[in-house]
Amino acid sequence: MKVLLVNGSQHKTGCTHTALMEVAKELEKAGIETEEFWCGNKAIMGCIGCGKCAKSFKCWNGEDTVNDFLDMVKDCDGFVFGTPVHFAGTSGFIKPFMDRAFCSKASLFYNKPAAAIVSCRRGGAQGAFEDMNRYFNFACMPVVSSNYWNEVHGNTPEEIVQDLEGMQTMRQLGRNMAWMLKCIEAGKAAGIAYPEQEAKVKTNFIR
């Protein structure tokens, strides 16, 4: 089993990375393979809703990291998406990245557990945390929780490590993710099928 840790910070080894690595330690203790994927610090174009990716599951724009991520999705059993807090919301890197990764591609993620973590200096964590979780609900992904909201506080990686409650939250998240993945694996072995997926019904509210 493998969990992909998506780092949506422009700083490759900054605060978000530090939090993700704390999650990774617990997953690896439980025998779960992990890999970190960095969105990068170059501009990521927003989704234009063209729908071209619905069949290929690839975005027509291959100039950034979105398609590299999509190439890895099929081989992963779970995901942890991390973002720093910018103006009480997600980073300008992770938001367009996730818009394009999930648009018309929800079936890639069906029933794969996911979690969001956020890193902030002081405030604004809840807005970013809630925004990230909306993608998982849209894609029918079981959302993994911890013993508190998945956030760490600090302005540097060294300060993040001093946030003892935040780091504990990351560790518990890793253990909970490992438990859920093993439960899913045990269910499959016992012949329990995934829930049936109905064809999507879309209702417009213009009358």
Image (cartoon, grey):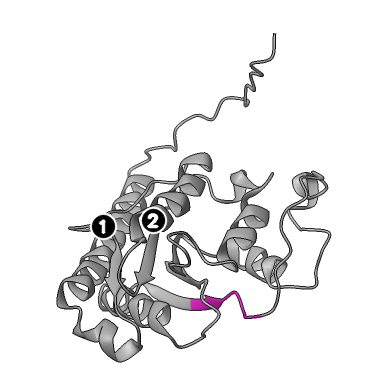
Res 149 quadrant in image: bottom left
Q: Quadrant of the N terminus?
A: bottom left
List x then y, in percent, for residue 21.
35, 81
> Does 197 sit above or below residue 76?
above
Q: Name the residue under label 1.
A: 149
Q: In which quarter of the image is the C terminus?
A: top right
Find residue 191 and report its image quarter.
top left
Q: What element carries label 1?
A: loop
Q: Mark 2 points at which residue?
A: 129
> Can residue 74 be seen at all in this image of the molecule?
no
First in sequence: mark 1 or mark 2? Answer: 2
> Magenta region: which residues?
36-41
Write the residue at 67% across / 47% down: 103
**Dots 1, 2 in contact, CB < 8 A:** yes
Numbered label tally? 2
Q: x, y percentage for residue 115?
A: 38, 58
- Element type at marker 2? helix
Q: Is residue 57 magenta?
A: no
Residue that lies at the very extreme toward the top in this rendered image: 207
| Residue 27 pos. (x, y %) | 31, 72
Q: Which residue is drawn at 68% across and 72% down?
A: 65
Kindly identify the residue that appears in the image at 73 percent across and 73 percent down: 64
Amino acid at circle 1 = Trp
Residue 122: percent from the left, percent from the top?
30, 70
Where, by quadrant of the figure, is residue 101 drawn? bottom right
Instruction: Evaluate whether residue 88 shows in this view.
Output: yes
